[in-house]
Image (cartoon, rainbow, N blue to C red):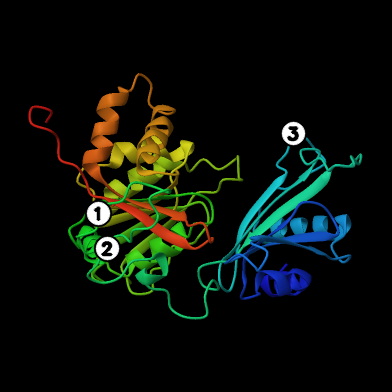
Amino acid sequence: MSVGVIERMLQPLASYYEHPDFEEIAINQPGEVWCRRHHPDEYDRIWMRIEDEQLTLSWLLTICRAIANTYDQPFSPHDPTKPSTVFATLPPVEHRFGAIAGMNVVYDQTIPEGGVALCIRKGAGGERAREVDFSDWGLVEGRGVQKGHEHLARLSDPQQDAVQCLKDAVQQGCNILISGGTSTGKTTLFNKIIEQVDPRTRIITVEDTREIKLKKHPNHVHLVLSRTDRNSIFGYDDAIDVIMRFTPDIVLVGEISTSNAGALWKLTGTGHGAMMTTIHASTVNHCYDVLYERIAANIPNLDREKTVQKIRENFCIIQMSRDINGERIITDIQAPQPPKHGDA
């Protein structure tokens, strides 16, 4: 089935996820769609529920099967021994589609065949009609991270030029970790920061779905590791072997997870280029803890204190969140911290 056919099949949902006020849609059960707004409405609501009788259980299953077939993913929701999830990046603007079906989904009113739940998050190419800038996350040239968000995270020195700090971190080859919760704009900011990288740079990307944009960097290789194909023999350790032989200046990783953290940690500091990636965490300190825990899940007997100190030394952390009005903001920029005297 062609991608064009998928686009036509998704038309009943397109009016929701293409709407300029919405950044994500979710279907929890047939007959309704929940739309997440960029900003709260007059009733201070971020999520809006809309009834839609077109969204039947049969139609939702058909969509899942069609996308799974198009992207060559195994999908058998009624067989508990086979995959019941579908993940895909939908052209032309990389909307992120995720769905789960079968007995793992239970509605308030249980049905024998199980249910379907799905989300479509607007891709970076379709998120805004205009070009994004650092000011979209509350940063302004010549000024530090803005005050007024102390309830969200510890702020960096407000006397420093935060935008220049970000650019310097990129141009000086820092390892960069963008930290934040779901839908705080990590991927969009990631792509914006990549624009600061010298176009002559050789880049290798490692992702489970294609989201990283390299329009200005022709010398690049994209590696994709499927999170749904359990039969694939190409894993993160294999990807690291490729990276170490392909001589990148920078390695871009879509997101840190339990499955890749150990392998990527081994790559850090080996001289095979800087690394930029994202992680789900609510504060900078939480980010250190989450990264350690994901690394430790793959590397036994890891010393927590020494590993967290190495993370502090090796990474520039950019912390993202949302303010009380739902605006995406950068709340902290933590530069790499050199070892204390006697710790090196």
Quickly name the residue at label 1.
247
Nearer the observer, 94 or 42 = 42
Give the side of residue 341 with respect to residue 283, left or right. Answer: left
Mark yes or no: residue 76 visible.
no
Nearer the observer, 165 or 14 = 165
Task: Determine whether 4 is above or below 43 in the image.
Answer: below
Q: Secondary structure at mark 2?
A: loop
| Mark 2 residue type | Arg
Are dots 2 and 1 in contact, CB under 8 Å?
yes
Give the side of residue 143 with respect to residue 259, left or right. Answer: left
Task: Determine whether 26 is above or below 285 in the image.
Answer: below
User: Of callouts 3 and 2, which one flags the residue occurring earlier in the amino acid sequence?
Assistant: 3
Give x and y (percent) for residue 36. Answer: 64, 62
Which of the 4 image quadrants contains residue 291? top left
Quickly name the residue at label 2.
202
Q: What distance separates the C-alpha of mark 3 from that of mark 2?
A: 42 Å
Task: Determine whether 109 is above or below 53 in the image.
Answer: above
Q: What distance separates the C-alpha of mark 1 from that of mark 3?
A: 40 Å
| Mark 1 residue type | Thr
Are dots 1 and 3 in contact, CB under 8 Å?
no
Screen quadrant of the C terminus: top left
User: Of callouts 1 and 3, which one flags the residue occurring earlier in the amino acid sequence?
Assistant: 3
Screen quadrant of the N terminus: bottom right
Mark yes or no: residue 271 visible.
yes
Task: Residue at 44%, 28% (x, y): give it.
Answer: 297
Quickly name the residue at label 3.
81
Give x and y (percent) for residue 272. Answer: 23, 48
Q: Secondary structure at mark 1?
A: loop
Q: Secondary structure at mark 3?
A: loop
| Mark 3 residue type | Thr
